[in-house]
Image (tube, rainbow, N blue to C red):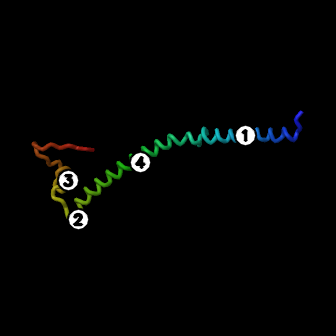
Amino acid sequence: MPSVSKILPFGFNMIMMAMLISFAMQLINADGGLMSLRPLDDYIITATAEFNNLKLEETYLRKKVSLLSLDTIDPDMLGELARQKNGLYDDNELVIFTE
């Protein structure tokens, strides 16, 4: 018959192993675990793409605003804006609204 001193460490080791496995499962599968990071990666990719699109739009708008600066006004841009605001288009002109 095994002595108590030999059974006790074995039982302790089994309990510790069960706790370790439990913690590992929680780390992987819990609400804030490693498996929950995959949707977060998809969200980051989507947000990065949207950010890049907004940067391109900002660049376009900054260029358009720079054409209307007080120092140098681009005559074509000024004419385009004046005609757009006042509805002064010829019959033979094609107007394409992008908004």
Cα distance in 3D space between marks 3 and 4: 33 Å
Please name the residue that numbered disc 2 is placed on: 70
Question: Residue 83 versus residue 40: which sits nearer the camera?
Answer: 40
Cα distance in 3D space between marks 4 and 2: 35 Å
Which percent across, then down, holds residue 82?
18, 54
Please name the residue that numbered disc 1 is placed on: 17
Mark 1 Cα shell of 10 Å, populated few (<14), some (14-19), many (≥20): few
Cα distance in 3D space between marks 3 and 1: 74 Å
| Circle 1: residue type | Met
The disc label shown at residue 48, or none: 4
Cα distance in 3D space between marks 2 and 1: 75 Å
For the residues labelled 2 and 3, say whether their Cβ atoms are less than 8 Å apart.
Answer: no
**Badge 3 or badge 4: first in the primary sequence:** 4
**Badge 3 or badge 1: first in the primary sequence:** 1
Judged from the image, the secondary structure of the residue bearing numbered disc 4 is helix
| Circle 4: residue type | Thr
Which numbered disc, 3 or 1, marks the residue closer to the eye? 1
Q: Which residue is at 81% across, 42% downward?
A: 9
Mark 3 Cα shell of 10 Å, populated few (<14), some (14-19), many (≥20): few
Which numbered disc, 4 or 1, marks the residue closer to the eye? 1
**Badge 4 or badge 2: first in the primary sequence:** 4
Can you tell which quarter of the image residue 35 is in? Answer: top right
Which percent across, then down, holds residue 19?
72, 40
| Circle 2: residue type | Leu
| Circle 3: residue type | Leu
Question: Residue 47 versus residue 65: which sits nearer the camera?
Answer: 47
Query: Is residue 10 rendered to the left or right of residue 50?
Result: right
Q: Which residue is at 37% across, 49% downward?
A: 52
